[in-house]
Image (cartoon, rainbow, N blue to C red):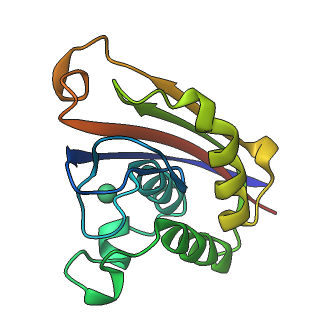
Amino acid sequence: MKIRTGLGYDVHALASGRQLWIGGVLIPHTLGLQGHSDADVLIHALCDALLGAANLRDIGFHFPDTASEFEGIDSKLLLARTMELVRSRGWELGNADITVCAERPKLNPHIPAMKAALARAMGADEEDISIKATTTEHLGFTGREEGISAYAVVLITKE
Ligand code: MG
């Protein structure tokens, strides 16, 4: 069996008048993430980790933010398409481990719903998807609530 790992990282700015989508879940908050799609920072980091593990470039290569077809798109659709690409090369998800850095709002109560949403979009087992939330102790752009960042690591396998 072959195994590979991949790393993904993404950042989106917080802005008023936007919805806050993280991990495929709409989270009540006064600010949302700015972006061409729904700006789901967690899913974008996860897509990049999957594409990186399969050596399939990155999310911007497959889903350019200049393309009108991706404007306002639900990132769960991008994740589902990413899994199709990865599986088309014979790879299957081993596990994913994701960390989201946000000062506010509290994300922990939403993690079970996020895991369920990701598992559904990926056609994967919730048991193989870990999501963690942290603050940066008021330091840096996430600490100042200017934006939210996410890191993802995945392992993929091929028989
Ligand atoms: Mg992004």
Tell me residue 63's x, y (percent): 35, 77
**In the rendered image, which quarter contains the N terminus?**
bottom right
Inspect this view and state whether residue 21 appears: yes
- Give the left or right position of residue 113, taking residue 41 as reference: right
In which quarter of the view is residue 79 placed? bottom right
Tell me residue 11's x, y (percent): 27, 45
Task: Please report the residue visible at 77 percent of the width from the left and 47 percent of the height from the top.
Answer: 126
Ligand 1 shown in quarter: bottom left
- Give the left or right position of residue 144, taking residue 2 as reference: left
Q: From this view, report whether residue 40 is shown above or below residue 31.
A: below
- In front of the other: 38 or 154: 38
Tell me residue 128's x, y (percent): 76, 44
Tell me residue 75's x, y (percent): 46, 67
- In front of the other: 89 or 141: 141
Seen as rendered, the residue at the extreme top is 137
Task: Please report the residue visible at 34 percent of the width from the left and 88 percent of the height from the top.
Answer: 69
Q: From this view, report whether residue 104 is shown above or below residue 11.
A: above
Inspect this view and state whether residue 58 appears: no
Task: Please report the residue visible at 75 percent of the width from the left and 66 percent of the height from the top.
Answer: 123
